[in-house]
Image (cartoon, rainbow, N blue to C red):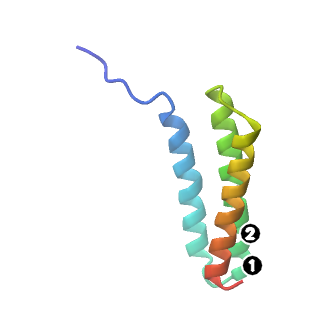
């Protein structure tokens, strides 16, 4: 019987989903505290950036452009969410 093959980086994407899921859960949990929500947004953005850099390092495809891309996407996402919250 053949073993099913899964994506080699499947565990990496589970970690990403956990980071983003925890960020969303905490954001909704602290819906009455804008300061705490801002902290959660920035912490999630940092987690996303670190995940992206580590992921690309582990698959041997890390470049300075990829690092800047993750930083810019995290910053832009944070600004968009903060603008929706009303900061």
Residue plotted at (68% across, 37% down): 54
Tell me the quarter of the image containing the C terminus: bottom right
Relative height, residue 38 to residue 58 (above, below): below
Q: Position of residue 27 (x, y in %)?
A: 60, 71
Give the residue at the far top of this rendering.
1
Image-quadrant location for residue 25: bottom right
Tell me the quarter of the image containing the N terminus: top left
Q: Is residue 25 left or right of residue 37?
A: left
Look at mark 2 in the image and give the residue it sits on: 39
Secondary structure at numbered mark 2: helix
Q: Is residue 84 left or right of residue 34?
A: left
Pointers 1 and 2 in contact (CB under 8 A)? yes
Look at mark 1 in the image and give the residue it sits on: 35
Relative height, residue 32 to residue 2 (above, below): below
Q: Position of residue 47 (x, y in %)?
A: 68, 52
Residue plotted at (56% across, 66% down): 24
Q: CA distance from mark 1 to mark 2?
A: 6 Å
Residue plotted at (61% across, 27% down): 59
């Amino acid at each position: 019987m053949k073993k099913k093959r899964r994506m080699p980086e499947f565990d990496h994407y589970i970690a990403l989903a956990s980071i983003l899921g925890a960020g969303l859960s905490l954001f909704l949990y602290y819906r009455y505290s804008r300061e705490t929500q801002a902290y959660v947004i920035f912490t999630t953005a940092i987690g996303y950036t670190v995940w992206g850099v580590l992921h690309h390092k582990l698959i041997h495809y890390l470049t300075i452009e990829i690092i800047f891309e993750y930083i810019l996407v995290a910053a832009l996402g944070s600004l968009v969410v903060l603008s929706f919250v009303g900061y």
